[in-house]
Amino acid sequence: MLSVAVEEANFRKGPSQRDDIVFTAVRLFPVKVVERTKGWVKVEDFEGDQGWVASHLLAEDPTVIITATHANLRKEPSTKSELVGTAEHAEVYRVVERKEQWLKLSADDEERGWIRDDLVWGD
């Protein structure tokens, strides 16, 4: 798994800047590596879409995207813990800690809370 390291990255039909753009993704967007060739990486996103992106636009930051429609963020890694916020479908977050099936998320360098890993894709 890798994530977008720049503000916005274009994903293309093939491993060349001449190839058409098939989708664009924002910083921290997680992708699964499918193939690598000559400075390009073929990836798949959480919806199964595939595209090629220049490898220098990706990083090894652990990130996730919310797959649930709405997801609760908790103060501690437990469903009994205080609710501190919600996350919406397709929002992206950095993972700062893991405890069993729980992930501690941050965005804009601010901790947001804990979420169960079955409500996200990535990491």
Image: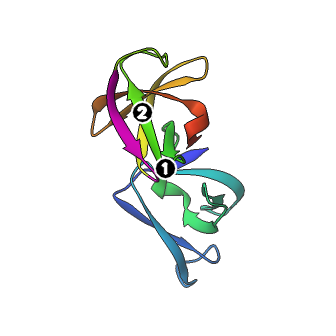
Q: Is residue 123 visible?
A: no
Which of the numbered marks, if any, corresponds to residue 72? 2
Tell me the residue at 54%/85% (across/down): 18
Residue 9: name its quadrant: bottom left
Left or right side of 37 for 60: left
Tell me the residue at 49%/16% (across/down): 78
Q: Main secondary structure of the magenta part?
A: strand
Whole-percent x and y of residue 69?
48, 50
Query: Under tag 1, what secondary structure?
Result: loop
Tell me the residue at 61%/17% (across/down): 100
Residue 86 inside the magenta-drawn segment: yes
The kind of residue tagged 1 is Thr
The kind of residue tagged 2 is Asn
Left or right side of 32 for 79: left
Q: Quadrant of the N terminus?
A: top right
Alpha-carbon neighbours of circle 1 within 10 Å: few (<14), some, or many (≥20)?
few
Whole-percent x and y of residue 47?
62, 60
| Tally of marks | 2
Alpha-carbon neighbours of circle 2 within 10 Å: few (<14), some, or many (≥20)?
some
Q: Which residues are magenta?
A: 83-90
Compared to 18, does 105 lie above or below?
Answer: above
Between 13 and 45, the one nearer to me in the picture: 45
Tell me the residue at 41%/15% (across/down): 81
Between 77 and 14, the one nearer to me in the picture: 77
Between 14 and 95, the one nearer to me in the picture: 95
